[in-house]
Amino acid sequence: MQTAADELVATYLRALGAADVGLAVSLFTADGVVHSPLYGPRPAQDFYSELFADTSQANLTLKSVMSGKNQDGQTTVSFWFHFDWRLPSGAAAPFDVVDVATLGSDGKISELHIIYDTVDVRPAFEAEVGQLSWRQAHSG
């Protein structure tokens, strides 16, 4: 039986795979924020517009979906997946990732924290876009 969390994750991964900004953003509250290691904290609309502009292809393999409550009692959905990310040039920048979504009372994502090791992805991304990623540009 598919749960609401499973349905949310399936729709989210479908949006990522299709580079569908509208579908991705429809899963967020109006003030939804994405916290990304490469792009920094961004409104959902801005984040997905930028991500999809930097993507030529995305193949996603779901590994696990977990749901529960955070310390404030808000519903959270975490999902672990492999993101075979291809940059605009076709360069590979794959990684395993856990996304942690905090849901509002309407079941939409109010905050999404993207968690992964960028040691291999960051150099490929920065070479592709010709500038430092968010963390690099804002450190020291």
Image (cartoon, rainbow, N blue to C red):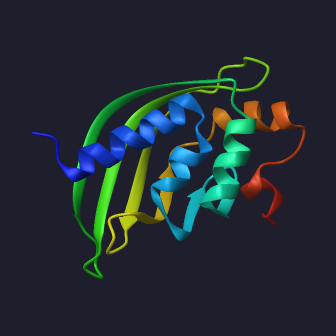
Of all residues, the one furthest to the bottom in this rendering is 72
Of all residues, the one furthest to the left in this rendering is 1
Foreground residue, 95 or 79? 79
Q: Position of residue 106 (x, y in %)?
A: 33, 70
Task: Please state, as top left, top right, bottom left or bottom right, where the N terminus lies in the image.
Answer: top left
Task: Please state, as top left, top right, bottom left or bottom right, where the C terminus lies in the image.
Answer: bottom right
Q: Position of residue 62 (x, y in %)?
A: 34, 31
Q: Position of residue 88 (x, y in %)?
A: 77, 25
Residue 57's image quarter?
A: top right
Foreground residue, 78 or 25? 25
- Judge left or right: residue 82 versus residue 21: left
**Measuring 90% from the left and 38% from the top, which residue is drawn there?**
130
Give the vertical position of 86 relative to 20 (above or below): above
Give the vertical position of 88 relative to 70 (above or below): above
- Judge left or right: residue 123 versus residue 58: right
Q: Position of residue 82 (x, y in %)?
A: 44, 30
**Measuring 65% from the left and 57% from the top, which residue is drawn there?**
45
Of all residues, the one furthest to the top in this rendering is 90
- Judge left or right: residue 133 versus residue 74: right
Give the vertical position of 55 relative to 29 (above or below): above
Foreground residue, 39 or 23? 23
**Measuring 39% from the left and 35% from the top, which residue is drawn there?**
81
Q: Count every numbered label the image shows and give the total.
A: 0
**Measuring 84% from the left and 37% from the top, which residue is drawn there?**
129
Residue 30's image quarter?
A: bottom right
Foreground residue, 15 or 76? 15
